[in-house]
Amino acid sequence: MEKKTKPHHCGTSKKSNTFVVQLYLLLVLLITLNISTTSQAFNYTDALSKSLLYFESQRSGRLPYNQRVTWRDHSGLTDGLEQGVDLVGGYYDAGDHVKFGLPMAFTVTMLSWSVIEFRQQIAAAGELEHAMEAIKWGTDYFIKAHTSPNVLWAEVGDGDTDHYCWQRPEDMTTSRQAYKIDETHPGSDLAGETAAAMAAATLVFKKTNPHYAHLLLHHAQQLFEFGDKYRDKYDGSLGVVKSYYASVSGFKDELLWAALWLYRATDNEKYLKYVISKAHSFGGIGWAITEFSWDVKYAGLQLVASRLLIEEKHKQHSHILELYRSKAEHYICSCLNKNNDTKNVERTPAGLLYIRQWNNMQYVSTAAFLLTVYSDFLKSSNQKLSCHGGMVGHEEVLDFAKSQIDYILGSNPMNMSYLVGYGPKYPQRVHHRGASVESYRENKGFIGCTQGYDNWYGGKEPNPMFWLGLWLEGLIVKIILWTKGTIICRLRPVHIIQLHLVGVFAKFSEVLISRDGEKEGASDGAVVDFRGNPVDKSKTGGWLAAGLILGIELAERICVMGISMNLVTYLVGNLHISSAKSATIVTNFMGTLNLLGLLGGFLADARLGRYLTVALSAAITGLGIILLTLATSIPSMRPPPCDDYRKQHHECIEANGKQLALLYAALYTTALGGGGIKSNVSGFGSDQFDARDPREEKSMIFFFNRFYLALALGAMIIALVVLLSGTPFYRFHKPQGSPLTVIWRVIFLAWKKRAYPYPAHPSLLNQYQEAKIPHTQRLKCLDKAAILDEYASAEGNRSNPWIVSTVNQVEEVKLVFKLMPVWSTCILFWTVYSQMTTFTIEQATFMNRKIGSFVIPRVLSLPFSSSPFSCLLP
């Protein structure tokens, strides 16, 4: 809660602490030096997941069935009853039980902006559904609070009486008086921010819930008209908010802010003209701001407006938009310490941005968000930031934003995370009523105002409720305030700090992987759901999808192995083909099946993708089984039966070519389908896990470890149905090109340029400096594929892979050729192994397999030949 009062101190005067202060600062600087030389890696995906839990812990009203913060229960169920309106829902502020409209609206605006900017990354982290639920919990409340076009309920509860009590929200006995703005008590700032929140949320729900988005837009437009028509600050109409969330900046920034978000939501020119025409009079291009917060919106407004410059349709307004951009860049440069000395944001000795003593962390988190968004803008528009201190690239902007986030997560003099539950060290006694008192679900006995203070407020033990996802603001401020002879001992969670970092965490979880380049699956648009949208990890992939995919491979293995194990018996016993020729047929069938795996892999990588390739291959395999059934069932497809006498004298009539034609068609149709399945199904299964997520990475390893263990179950037709039924749950990697294409291209170009002389130095080869794989001298003949002749050097040709290869591509092909000796060592083994499916079965045919009246099936002879290998396994 943003109460403007003198904070509680837990130190003494400056005079009595001079030596201690100096000693502490020396220690801080020494620790800072240590931090600067130590690189810490943070799990931003985990931080994102934990931070979203905060919003669930702050919910007011009747909690949903899928509430994850289970120590909370229903509360505030009579809010608005005295005034005859339904104000149940929304969010409590900080560690208190008041619902303040202005910071709550800003919370929803920024959460929505995070999803708009980083939707794909949040979805890849599996948190999109939770983020959208957090937004909708707020917008549902705003719909209730906006009871008529010119009425908006601004606050529920009273901060003064609330501070007299230390209770769980489920036990509240404090005032639940509700306050509103209307025509006679206007509040343009509150109306404007709420309009901005609902307009931004419109963009979030536009595709997934268009009816709800339309409803939000309707309320947003009414609220903007109301705020613009009846102009005044809301704290002038509602004195009750002045001590907590006073609107110091006025209402003009909120009206511009709302108009800009409405323009983005509607593309209606009237809202853009409002932003342009009032740019001067409302301070949009007059204020050079070094902070962005729930009260002061100018920096965010200027940044959003400046991004309109890249669109051709806004050229007529380029003069004003350039002024917006200059102010936005002033903010970015001041954070980067690139402005004139007097216009930069202060920093702590450890490098944290410092705006002011009270709740400094909100300014750090807002700066990190705006820096991250602007870095993306610079990158996408191929521009650089112009500061007094020189030109700045997008990576430098992003790196500084990351340094602020890393400080919060533990790269600080305290070596402590300010996100509760994240990392090995974090605060455990948080200034929060609900978390510091035992759970209502555990103890439904009433806890009164003074009882909470007596029994819980001053407790020395960690909070009873292990509360994940709280942003804490106190310990960071402590470092600064020691120099002023004061120690601030506040550890309070506030959602105006939390909200900005949802998208930033998602962004850095992507950036960390893309920079390291160690794991596949970076968020580049190649991973989508069956509709082609970015995947939501909470609804796709994982063990459910992988289990369904396993079914198709299980059935394929049973199908193919069943055929190969029994085929030689059928060929010899029913078609009267010699043992040698039968063995050749079986070997050719299995060899073709394995070779056709290359074709299946090529089609999946180059064009179809793994899902379609597996589905089509399963259908082809099914067709092959039908043909095989016909070939073995139709009497005319077999030669006349042969008795034992003729068999002994080799007088049986062998199947003719016509009879074998259908059998061959069946076998090689099955081989075509089986090859497509075999080469893709394990990869498709692994696609259901994200290698960037430590938890899913472990599941992926487990999946591969157990993959072959599960290959004894299922049936092909059933598995195909199962595979298709799981379509909505899969993640689909778009075809990115086949390695076989690269190999063929390099060989083709090397042969084509075989007469070219080698360049004087390898650095003259195409993209030598950009190659991720160092150039080698072996297989030098392939280097000719990367020679830049006059034609290849022409504009546009250098990037054409059919004209000239890159050094990296050449080295990749060299690696493949270097693996050939390793691959060739397997040929002898598979030659021997293939005899198991023919010779062993053939031998069993002539063995006495009777045990009493029971005859052991010939196929059961195979385990005896493979069991010795099992004994040698470690």
Image (tube, grey):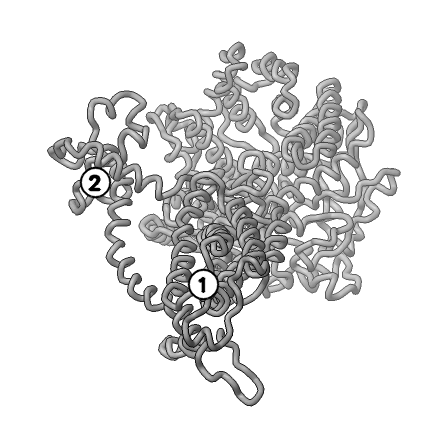
Residue occupying image coordinates x 80% and y 45%:
176
Residue 782, numbered circle = 2
Q: Nearer the viewer, mark 1 or mark 2?
A: 1
Residue 244 or 867: which is nearer the viewer? Answer: 867
Give the residue number, with chain letter if any, for mark 1: 654
Residue 59 location, x and y as percent?
A: 70, 48
Question: Which quadrant would the N terminus be assigned to in this image?
Answer: top right
In the image, residue 526 above or below residue 557: above
Q: Nearer the viewer, residue 159 or 387?
A: 387
Q: Position of residue 57 (x, y in %)?
A: 66, 52
From the viewer's perspective, tell me whether residue 625 is left or right of residue 434.
left
Residue at 53% across / 12% down in the picture?
317
Quarter assignment of residue 429: bottom right
Q: CA distance from mark 1 to mark 2?
A: 51 Å
Judge from the rendering whether residue 748 lies leftward or rightward of residue 552; answer left or right.
left
Q: Name the residue: 77% across, 61% down.
A: 447
Q: How packed is label 1: few (under 14 Cα within 10 Å), some, or many (20 or more)?
A: some
760 versus 549 height, above or below: above
Residue furthest top as drawn: 316
The quadrant the C terminus occupies is bottom left
Residue 87 screen position, x and y as percent:
80, 41
Amino acid type at image mark 2: Leu
x then y, percent, for residue 619: 56, 49
Q: Secondary structure at mark 1?
A: loop
